[in-house]
Image (spheres, grey):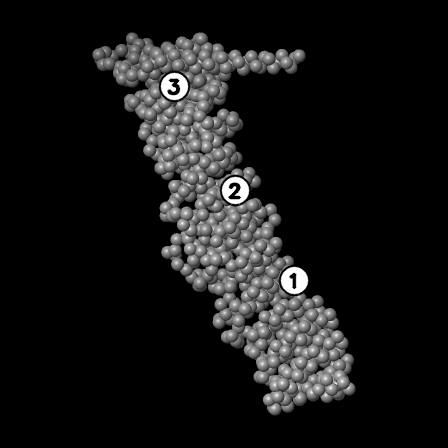
Amino acid sequence: MNAERDLAPLAPGVVRALTDKLYEKRKVAALEIEKLVREFVAQNNTSQIKHVIQILSQEFALSQHPHSRKGGLIGLAACSIALGKDSGLYLKELIEPVLTCFNDADSRLRYYACEALYNIVKVARGSVLPHFNVLFDGLSKLAADPDPNVKSGSELLDRLLKDIVTESNQFDLVGFIPLLRERIYSNNQYARQFIISWILVLESVPDINLLDYLPEILDGLFQILGDNSKEIRKMCEVALGEFLKEIKKNPSSVKFAEMANILVIHCQAADDLIQLTAMCWMREFIQLAGRVMLPYSSGILTAVLPCLSYDDRKKNIKEVANVCNQSLMKLVIPEDDEMDEAKPSMTLPAEPTSEESLSKPETATSGESPLDVIALNQPLSFPYSCERIQVTLNLDGIVQVLDYHLSDTSIGMMTRIAVLKWLYHLYIKTPRKMFRHTDSLFPILLRTLSDESDEVILKDLELLAEIASSPAGQTEEGHGLSDGSDVRPGPVELHVPARAGQLSSSSTKGLECSPSTPTMNSYFYKFMINLLKRFSSERKLLETRGAFIIRQLCLLLNAENIFHSMADILLREEDLKFASTMVHTLNTILLTSSELFQLRNQLKDLKTPESRNLFCCLYRSWCHNPVTTVSLCFLTQNYKHAYDLIQKFGDLEVTVDFLTEVDKLVQLIECPIFTYLRLQLLDVKNNPYLIKALYGLLMLLPQSSAFQLLSHRLQCVPNPELMQTTDNTKPSTSFKRTAASNIDYTELLQHFEKVQNKHLEARHQRAGRAEQLDRRVVL
């Protein structure tokens, strides 16, 4: 009786019926409660109404007895029906106990709770919106309920709540976003489906601008896009597609900068759909936001560059990545070279909640490099609505990423080409800033010359040529050359000049008289030194690609400067065998390459002081190889000196290699390159030393095919008596040229003997070492 009195104004019969196990009896009790509450409403007796709700909540809905809880739920629903429009005044008291029952272990009870809440919400309609977050939280749990009846009931309630939100203009989006951001990371398929369905609904409501809060949920959406369920992936694709359409319609109101890093991360996802979608978003962001995306360039490149080497299985991703790469490159302008890096642009504070979502384990992709999230260290927000606000290009970060990808041997060919194109573009657009990075880039660019791909080597040479010829390389005197990491002055190498053309005093006579090189900077000479060092240490590169590399450089840079500097460097080369091989390679290029036609013509005539100085410089290095020295004399029409050199060959050690080179020279004489020389054989009187030199070569050769070839050629030389003309007073052009040349041939001949003596000593030393080694092996 005490319990019954405590539960007043509920009649004892009503109390007994509410706790009955039969649903029909509980329903009859609910009708009585509805009638009772209606009377209180008519009397405006709010205290009694609150008391009834409290009893139904505390004594029934939250009771330990399951039947009592069922009675409490149907009683609270009855109260709501009785209250009608006034139920909004008591919603907190009505909803909370029902939501508590959502967690009940009994599935039937959870179903009744769902039914009760449906009736409460149906009566209250828009009044429930202030309690939307707790309702959404409860529904998100029921969406993943294992019981199909409970799930079905929750779907009915969910549809009702969506109708209410859609027709209302008082939805509190700001208060809802934190809950949505939290729930969006659920791994349960049904919960994810529930979340996406709500995002689609909110996106469709004109009065709700979900786009403003897209940075809060974008990462979660991309996570859901990787769900195993095709249906959920499709729903997520639709949601992301709708957002992208809205972004394209209203780009001025989009927070591009806050979402840039999210896209960078998902552009590196292992899942193809996530990666392709994120890459498509990135393409649109770069095209719509423009230079606002520049501060995130390093992160974007980290994500985009590897995709450029994808095969046809990921053709779509590759194509979109290529567009992203090209669009981003276009954003770098010459003005970026002038902006002061010490003054950062205006930035908006990054939202910590966004970073928290990015730091979740789900966002990490296995196998990422340490640079994959390099952009996260940059400001997360930039002004995006005003183009006049300066945006700073983070060149250090970009170069770091490019260097990393160029150094990685596992990176595909197309990626390496893209990296080299980027570096070339940066040297063109921002040379002043880029030259601060040249010393760190130089070693890897030289190593790239050993790449398997000709196309990669071509791009690498274009970049090196730009570095070597850029005027920006002259602005900071001696900058970047003091570390000595690549160039150590010594007996083998020259000191690198601070400016182009200012070579060391020990350089060959007349080197300063080569064409004034305003287009060459201090890195040009450094490049030549290191290129020869690379050829020396990697002979296979010299054999397979040496001629190709030097010929391309002659197209990209001044051929005379290249030959002049290489000859000067080789003059001081201690490895005499390499010097001889390198000279032979350079000589073959000089005599046979179409790219060097003008240089050959310049040397053939020796009309200018520059051409004569070049000849002297080349000659001194060409002395490392006797046969190439003779061929240089043939090219420059110094036939008497050629004859004098051949006379010296009798004092040299004649080897098989030596005779092979003489053989090749004879073959060259028969080529179009020496057409003028063969025609000069007609003028026997004025070219006696040419004939003597050729006979000298003939005497050097054993009876071979080359001997027969040269012998037949000399047999064609006409009788000088038959070739005489009436005009014998005209002086010879060849003597006229020789007299004007002012070249000290005696000194050159002495230099030749000196160099060849060094080679003889070196060969004897090598032979001695080999003999000692053989003796040790025998012992």
From the image, tell me which residue sits under label 1: 188
Residue drawn at 65 percent across, 12 percent down? 778
Q: Are marks 2 and 3 in contact (CB under 8 Å)?
A: no
372 vs 662, left or right, is: right
Residue drawn at 39 percent across, 41 percent down? 431
Foreground mark, 1 or 3?
1
Towards the viewer: 417 or 730: 417
Residue type of the residue flagged with mark 2: His
From the image, tell me which residue sits under label 2: 405
Residue drawn at 51 percent across, 50 percent down? 377
Q: Give the quarter of the figure containing the N terminus.
A: bottom right
Report crowding for label 1: few under 14, some 14 to 19, many 20 or more residues within 10 A (C-alpha).
some
> Tag 2's secondary structure?
helix
Residue type of the residue flagged with mark 3: Tyr
Towards the viewer: 335 or 606: 335
> Tag 1's secondary structure?
loop
Mark 1 or 3, nearer chain start:
1
Vertical side of 547 occupied by 678: above or below: above
Q: Determine which of the numbered discs, if any, sits on residue 343 in the image.
A: none
Q: Give the CA distance from mark 2 to mark 1.
A: 38 Å
Residue 709: x percent and y percent? Answer: 43, 15
* Rendering quarter of residue 739: top left
Residue type of the residue flagged with mark 1: Asn
Residue 230: x percent and y percent? Answer: 62, 60
Q: Determine which of the numbered discs, if any, sits on residue 619 in the image.
A: 3
Q: Give the CA distance from mark 1 to mark 3.
A: 80 Å
> Tag 3's secondary structure?
helix
Mark 2 or 1, nearer chain start:
1
Residue 308: x percent and y percent? Answer: 51, 46
Q: Are marks 2 and 1 in contact (CB under 8 Å)?
A: no
